[in-house]
Image (cartoon, grey):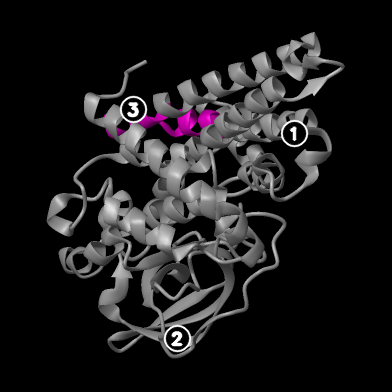
Amino acid sequence: MRGFTEEQLELQQLVREFADEVVAPASYEADRAHALPWPVIDRMGEMGLFGLPVPEEYGGQGGDYVDLCIAIEQIARVDQSVAITLEAAVGLGAMPILRSGTEEQKRHWLPRLASGRALAGFGLTEAEAGTDAGATRTTAVLEGDEWVISGSKQFITNSGTPRTELVTVTAVTGRDEAGRPELSAFLVPSGTPGFTVEPAYDKVGWNASDTHPLTFQKARVPAENLLGERGRGYANFLQTLTEGRVAIAALGVGVAQGCLDEALRYAGERTVFGRPVSSNQHIAFTLARMRSRVHLARLATYDAGFAMVAGEPFTAQASIAKIAASEAAMDNARDATQIFGGYGFMNEYLVGRHYRDSKILEIGEGTTEVQLMLIARELGIRS
């Protein structure tokens, strides 16, 4: 497997120290308050983390998607809510504009998104159109020089923060010759009349992350707010989701590593019957298995990331990475919680929060079942 450059190793160390010294101390209180720790987000913006894969001409750092994954992994070790805020802000907020936007759209939106001064959401999922995007009910009708959008979206990250300045929304704009829905994407600025951000969800985990349902009641946007070509929304968001799976995998790797770090520390400090817990062979073997999961998930994740930035096919690798990393995160969170015993059930302990937070990694940005379907298709199997 290809390795990190010297610059990427420096980035890894820089973000790791930032995560330990700045993100971690704020994590518990942010989780309790169900609110993003804005001083932490400000520091991330100052460090350029929101602009890592954005070209310098648009206010970014001029790096690549692997750089973003490195940063997400290190932050996820100590706080999943902050990590997913970064992942969604860049992977789902900025990248669709960078990949599909006009030059005017890029120059208007990307500098603020890359600085962290603004956030963007990605409105795809609906009540009956999550995995089945072809069942999208939200519509957009061209009336003169405006698109009129009506419908609703669910589970949209970064959609209702004080810094959210727009969401990208997929909508049906017509039918093709076979009667299938023609999907297109639109940039909808916050505050657009008819666009309502509904109250935030009461979630099981990712408590500090911002997540809302969205409603569009004849929301009007200029015709130039079409993102990419009309009818190309389906293909464009598939690319966004495939790239996003690599970033979510990096988040899962960070969680699995964080759980291992915490469990290893606790098992070495905690004594039972006069001996460290880690001297128990069952605990030692559990820690060894946790380490193995981290290693394999990390290899799968960066194999997909390197293939992506090299312009090679990576759809199957992205799905494999997401499965491996999300399962490693969930399994390591469970094992770490068990090693901590009663303390692991307390929210003030990181492993307890990881245990709550990790399940969504097997669901968001494509369920495990969807990933298996995509891998099977790569094998030439259709079901």
Q: Does the magenta stretch include residue 305?
A: yes
Amino acid identity at mark 1? Arg
In the figure, is residue 41 to the left or right of 330?
left
- View extreme (left): residue: 57
Please name the residue shown 38% across and 66% down the image.
Answer: 119
Which numbered disc, 1 or 2, marks the residue closer to the eye?
1
In this rendering, the answer to whether 191 lies above or below 250 is below
Identify the mark nearer the N-term, 3 or 2: 2
At mark 1, the secondary structure is: helix
Real-space CA distance between mark 1 and mark 2, rounded to the nearest whole angstrom: 44 Å
Amino acid identity at mark 2? Ala
Q: Main secondary structure of the magenta part?
A: helix
Location of residue 146 in the rendering, given as x and y in whole percent from the top left corner: 32, 85
The residue at which mark 1 appears reads as: 334
Q: Is residue 198 magenta?
A: no
Could one spot residue 377 in this view of the protein? no
- View extreme (right): residue: 273
Which numbered disc, 3 or 2, marks the residue closer to the eye?
3
Q: Quadrant of the N terminus?
A: top left
CB-based contact (under 8 Å), mark 1 and mark 2: no
Q: Which range is magenta? A: 304-322
Real-space CA distance between mark 1 and mark 3, rounded to the nearest whole angstrom: 30 Å
